[in-house]
Image: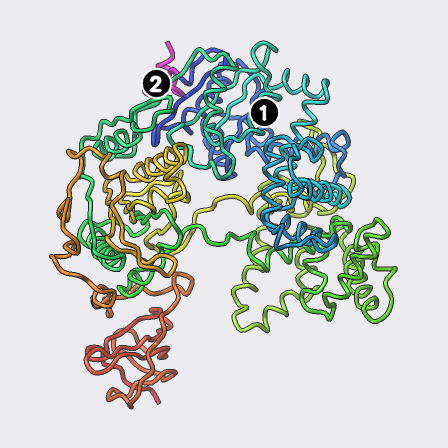
């Protein structure tokens, strides 16, 4: 009936059934690589195209801003609809939108700011100092986790079950933190969710309004929802007995790997029961990987008992076997990995960015990084600091926040002495005491401080107030340029030894703001601080461009962004790899105590989660999968002697190819002999064609000191000429005799390592 519709023409039978479901709640078990994003977006498009709902009657929730943007782009390509007004976004993004529309009823200021995790930690540290909390007994990070955990469970301080003095003290601090946030007009990520939930729970008219409005609610990555998120879904959608919306939950219980963040895999079973789900559709057709990889994943995850059950399949054929390698040491493992990577790139024509090395623990990366560096293979560690998390950007944003909201004490403390202006810790402490005594913000308490410290604080506040007076009528770009100029941030970083990158980042902030106002429809020339903004006709939301940009920055800071740049091997933890895919994947360190991790060994649920983690790792691979383990490994400064992981025994033998003997004696992994760390790294790098071009990619190893004058005569800082690369400057020289080499920066060809016995370098006078 539907297969003639262009929208539905390329769907397989399971996908088609999921997309054309009747208007009732359903669960879609979407396996890895089965096209779940396609199903979600096509479902929304089909509902709109068949006139079952209007665009304002759909609520779609994802877990990352990236996924939300992808969904909107796909929808826009499918149908001529304005997706900008639709409620498609992350839990935090949608709750922010909801609270902006109902800020008065939520008891929040119109310009409330969002604390990211770093700002939240700073706020808690400040609170502890003010109230004399012993930070050794109550570390601020642990207090932050305690507060976040309470909020995820939907508990305010008065609701927490207090059974001992320690918990009582934590609850007291939680209450003080609540009061502080309310006074300053700020909310953390947990508060966005909890306050939205409470407003829906306690206000009948708002709850009924949204339930009648959203006829269809779609939830992506349902297995990653925590207790509060699931309660929020039930509140905004309503259960069937309450004539609620049709909820389409899409997820994979086999990929639930975030229990440490509060994710409850049990929410899927609860959803089936509480929403009376009649339709459970399994998307088992995988479009990513070959069957040897999928059969390995299926066999492994089959050992988990508490699962809803599905088996991935493919029409692509068996493909390459899964290769298993045993090394004598982690150094030898790294060297083997480098050799295989080189073969994949040179022999098999893979690009480096399509090769990923996955590990269970961050500590494993060091040895691999050293091996890749020594071999001249570019690499990137996925998951470094993102743009809005960089210190210089956070400083600039703090200035913008204080312009928007003078009572934001967290931002005030971040920038009061940055760049340094002679305001010491003692002065700040006195100011905090004064603010506490008066029950006001730090900004307002400055006028009560006297002496030299008072004068400097007053000077800082005056600078902020003057800038605030200058901002009316300015665009967002002009305000940021004003802040960067007047506060001295740019000049401060220009004087730093390695401040050039920071200056570039601050300049990029201007571009980010310009791009934001254009994309969000404000217009490049819109007044950034306009107080009389017309409310959005769709949802009543009122936000100035400046407030919207600050919200965007806070929400983006917690989002996973892929790294851009040169073609390089991708190194990452298994957790970081979720949602990504690569042509070739190496899973290293498959040893008992490492993967599965020793913290989970005695816990049945923990072991099942580790197995799900391994399942996620396996299903990242499209064409080739390598599994490696080592007899010995240096971790945390100790040599460990390891047994191979139980997960290797859970894989089907017919899918595997053992590169080394399956059951060798000790120290036989590399041709029957022990390999020392030094031996493992004696393979010569490809000097003449090293791909070193980015200082961010990796740090240089220490250069050995030369004891005697080298015969080649090449010295650091010397200008030299090369017949192919032209003129360049020597950055480093190492080695002696036939092994001597120089690192030279050629303006036209970049930085290169050259073997001095081969490359003829002529000194330039």
**Mark-to-mark CA distance, 1 and 2:** 29 Å
Q: Where does the image place residue 569, in percent across and percent down from the top left?
A: 32, 53
- Return the residue nearer the eye: 551 or 80: 551
- Return the residue nearer the eye: 130 or 685: 130
So how many labels did they put on this image?
Answer: 2
Going from N to C along the chain, the mark reached first, 1 or 2, is: 2
- Placement of 420 over or under 78, stated as above or below: below
Q: Quadrant of the N terminus?
A: top left
Instruction: Say which residue appears at 74% left-offset and 45% top-offset.
Output: 180
SS under mark 2: helix
Observer-side mark, 1 or 2, equals: 1
Please give the residue where the numbered disc 1 appears in the rendered image.
Answer: 231
Q: Quadrant of residue 299?
A: top left
Please give the residue where the numbered disc 2 appears in the rendered image.
Answer: 14
Answer whether labels 1 and 2 touch (C-beta < 8 Å): no
Horizontal side of residue 120 vs 587, given as left or right: right
- Placement of 293 over or under 80, stated as above or below: below
Q: Where does the image place residue 528, in percent across and percent down from the top left?
A: 71, 47
SS under mark 1: helix
Q: Which mark is residue 658?
A: none
Q: Where does the image place residue 457, in percent across and percent down from the top left?
A: 79, 64
């Amino acid at each position: 009936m539907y297969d003639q519709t262009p929208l539905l023409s390329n769907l397989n039978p399971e996908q088609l059934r999921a997309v054309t479901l009747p208007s009732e709640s359903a669960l879609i078990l979407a396996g890895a690589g089965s096209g779940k994003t396609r199903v979600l977006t096509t479902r929304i498009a089909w509902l709109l195209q068949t006139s079952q709902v209007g665009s304002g009657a759909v609520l779609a929730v994802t877990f990352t801003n990236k996924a939300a943007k992808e969904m909107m782009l796909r929808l826009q390509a499918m149908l001529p609809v304005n997706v900008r007004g639709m409620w498609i976004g992350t839990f935090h993004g949608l709750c922010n939108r909801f609270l902006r529309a109902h800020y008065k009823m939520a008891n929040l200021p119109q310009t409330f700011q969002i604390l990211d995790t770093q700002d939240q930690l700073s706020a808690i540290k400040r609170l502890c100092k003010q109230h004399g909390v012993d930070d050794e007994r109550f570390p601020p990070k642990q207090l932050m986790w305690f507060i976040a955990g309470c909020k995820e469970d939907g508990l305010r301080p008065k609701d927490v079950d207090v059974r001992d003095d320690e918990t009582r003290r934590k609850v007291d601090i939680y209450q003080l933190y609540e009061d502080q946030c309310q006074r300053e007009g700020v909310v953390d990520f947990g508060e966005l969710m909890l306050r939205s939930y409470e407003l829906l729970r306690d206000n009948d008219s708002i709850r009924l309004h949204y339930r009648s409005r959203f006829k269809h609610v779609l939830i992506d990555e349902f297995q990653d929802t925590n207790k509060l998120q699931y309660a929020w879904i039930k509140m905004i959608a309503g259960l069937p007995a309450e004539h609620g919306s049709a909820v389409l939950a899409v997820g994979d219980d086999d990929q639930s790997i975030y229990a440490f963040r509060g994710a409850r895999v049990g929410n899927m079973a609860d959803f089936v029961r509480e929403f009376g789900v009649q339709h459970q559709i399994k998307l088992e057709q995988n479009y990513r990987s070959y069957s040897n990889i999928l059969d390995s994943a299926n066999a492994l995850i089959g050992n988990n008992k508490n699962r809803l059950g599905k088996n991935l399949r493919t029409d692509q054929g068996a493909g390459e076997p899964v290769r298993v390698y045993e090394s004598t040491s982690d150094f030898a493992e790294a060297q083997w990995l480098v050799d295989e990577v080189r073969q994949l790139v040179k022999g098999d024509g893979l690009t480096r960015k399509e090769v990923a090395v996955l590990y269970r623990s961050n500590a494993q990366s060091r040895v691999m990084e050293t091996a890749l560096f020594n071999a001249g293979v570019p690499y990137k560690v996925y998951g470094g600091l993102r743009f809005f998390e960089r210190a210089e950007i956070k400083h600039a944003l703090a200035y913008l926040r204080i312009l928007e909201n003078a009572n934001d004490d967290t931002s005030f403390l971040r920038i009061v002495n940055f760049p340094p202006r002679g305001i010491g810790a003692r002065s700040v402490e006195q100011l905090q005491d004064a603010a506490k005594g008066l029950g006001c913000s730090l900004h307002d308490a400055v006028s009560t401080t006297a002496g030299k410290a008072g004068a400097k604080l007053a000077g800082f506040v005056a600078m902020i107030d003057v800038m605030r007076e200058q901002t009316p009528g300015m665009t967002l770009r002009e305000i940021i340029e004003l802040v960067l100029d007047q506060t001295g941030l740019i000049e401060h970083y220009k004087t730093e030894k390695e401040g050039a990158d920071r200056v570039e980042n601050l300049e990029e902030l201007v571009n980010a703001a310009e791009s934001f106002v254009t994309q969000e429809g404000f217009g490049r020339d819109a007044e950034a601080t306009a107080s009389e903004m017309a409310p959005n006709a769709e949802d009543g939301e009122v936000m100035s461009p400046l407030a919207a940009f600050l919200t965007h920055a806070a929400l983006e800071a917690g989002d996973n962004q892929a790294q851009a740049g040169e073609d390089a091997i991708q190194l990452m933890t298994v957790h970081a790899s979720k949602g990504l895919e690569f042509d070739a994947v190496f899973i290293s360190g498959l040893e008992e105590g490492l993967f599965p991790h020793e913290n989970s060994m005695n816990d049945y649920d923990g072991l099942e989660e580790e197995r799900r983690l391994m399942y996620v790792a396996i299903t990242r691979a499209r064409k080739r999968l390598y599994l490696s383990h080592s007899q010995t490994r240096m971790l945390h400064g100790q040599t460990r002697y390891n047994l191979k992981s139980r997960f290797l025994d859970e894989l089907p033998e017919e899918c595997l190819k053992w590169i080394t003997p399956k059951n060798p004696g000790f120290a036989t992994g590399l041709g029957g002999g022990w390999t020392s760390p030094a031996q493992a790294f004696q393979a010569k790098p490809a000097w003449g064609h090293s791909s070193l071009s980015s200082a961010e990619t990796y740090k240089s190893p220490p250069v050995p000191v030369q004891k005697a004058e080298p015969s080649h005569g090449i010295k650091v800082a010397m200008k030299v000429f090369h017949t192919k690369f032209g003129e360049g400057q020597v950055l480093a020289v190492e080695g002696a005799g036939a092994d001597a080499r120089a690192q030279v920066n050629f303006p036209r060809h970049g930085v290169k390592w050259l073997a001095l016995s081969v490359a003829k370098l002529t000194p330039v006078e």
